[in-house]
Amino acid sequence: MNVYDSDKMFDILSENGYSSINNPEDADLVILNTCHIREKAGEKVYSDLGRIRKIKTNKNLRGKEMFIVVAGCVAQAEGEEIIKRAPFVDIVVGPQTYHKLPQLLKSVKKSIAPEIEISFPTEEKFDFLPKNNTHNRELSSFLTVQEGCDKFCTFCVVPYTRGSEYSRPVRDIVAEAKLLVSGGAKEIVLLGQNVNAYHGLANNGSEVGLDYVINCIADIEELDRIRFTTSHPRDMNKNLIKIFGSQKKLMPLMHLPVQSGSDKILKHMNRGHTIKDYKEIIYSLKMVRPEISFSSDFIVGYPGETDSDFDYTINLIQEIKFSQAFSFMYSPRPGTPASINNDQVAEKIKKNRLQELQKILNEERLNFNASFIGKKLNILLEKVTDSKSEFIGKSEYLQPVKVKCNQNLLGQTFNVFVESIDSNCLNARSLN
Ligand code: SAH
Ligand code: SF4
């Protein structure tokens, strides 16, 4: 979502005369769009700021101006604290107020005091964003349909940094999707912190779910592929499961974070579902779309996680066999209930558990990839390598695929024959 937000900030600023450059030394304005989800991401902001400060000082010595903006969830969570730690920052702006950037820049240019804008405004940010995209056009494009979260999992900062749940109206989503497709997008990834909790208004004023949005954008003829992320198991309703069986543009990969395989830990996390519920969703999806694969997020070392809780997670992974996954050591986040739990797990244990878990997940990913050797696979050809000798595509399951083909088929979706796999990709030749 930060990629999407950065593109939107770029759209707003390009309407105000800015353009993008590759070299921070030449920049009049530097924006760090930040992530607060784990401590490491948060701390990275300050080391990056240290680097940019030097550039700003050098520019100032040459009599030139440079403005520094910290945007995103670290800005939202830390606000004034950022100015205390890094007084050379000019603007701190949260993820719900970045549409105000032009105004903020104007006022900061007039005064020497920094601007901090981290409110949750009553107006809707999306109504103030430019309707045309000026950033780089991608074959695979993100489109935010839902933001925020009301679930308050005990480990997570999102409800505090992104605010409460909001779903954009269908009309706006379809208009943006058409614009992306007319700009060349062949794949659209619908985004939301809880994308499957989407409950926006259809054109006739009735409230509809994500399945409705998917069918609406699938009607755009030149669009080949649709994905959505990230979903919560609690919001996997019947209609959304059914649509995997009926909507062929919807890719057969479901990212469904489970976090832990232990019911006790899920309860402590306030996830609101059990492992039985999770498995039932997986099996219903397999019933409607037998070729579907699954990916997930895992947290190891949540406070109070014992060896046997961790074993339940391993058992689940071995049972479901995920085609890919993201896994993290639990990171205590300020202001969240789990961070003040006295049962914190030692760093060393967290590290060992993460290593063990990732080893198994990696084996499963490689086995999944190997199962395609000697078979056909549908890909969207997205890139040509720097040497222009190879093309890189993406399969329906998000696997990177290196393709030998005689002609330039960039932007096209077609079948390839998989010959071998490497640790990170599949090697294939075009059947054309
Ligand atoms: N809404 C999604 C997740 C969004 S956050 C869901 O409910 O599943 C993305 C991922 O970051 C989470 O799935 C979780 O695995 C990870 N994460 C969030 N907070 C974390 C923390 N405090 N420590 C470690 N990982 C965390
Ligand atoms: Fe965070 Fe997802 Fe839980 Fe919301 S549902 S609090 S975004 S982990």
Image: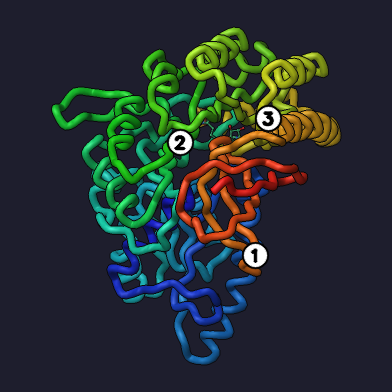
Q: CA distance from mark 1 to mark 2?
A: 29 Å
Rendered view: 420 above or below 67: above
Name the N-terminal-most of marks 1 and 3.
3
Rendered view: 189 above or below 9: above
Name the N-terminal-most of marks 1 and 2.
2
Amino acid at dot 2: Arg
| Image x and y of residue 42, in percent | 61, 50
Q: Residue at x 49, y 28 (%)?
A: 231
Q: Secondary structure at mark 2?
A: strand
Identify the residue under disc 1.
389
Q: Residue at x 46, y 87 (%)?
A: 64
Residue 399 shows in the view: yes
Identify the residue under disc 2.
227
Residue most toward the front? Answer: 432
Amino acid at dot 3: Ile
Total numbered labels placed on residues in the image: 3
Mark 3 CB within 8 Å of ligand 1: yes
- Whether residues under marks 1 and 3 lie with C-beta atoms below 8 angstroms apart, the answer is no
Amino acid at dot 1: Ser
Rendered view: 418 above or below 195: below
The coloring applied to the image is: rainbow
Name the N-terminal-most of marks 2 and 3.
2
Q: Residue at x 51, y 85 (%)?
A: 60
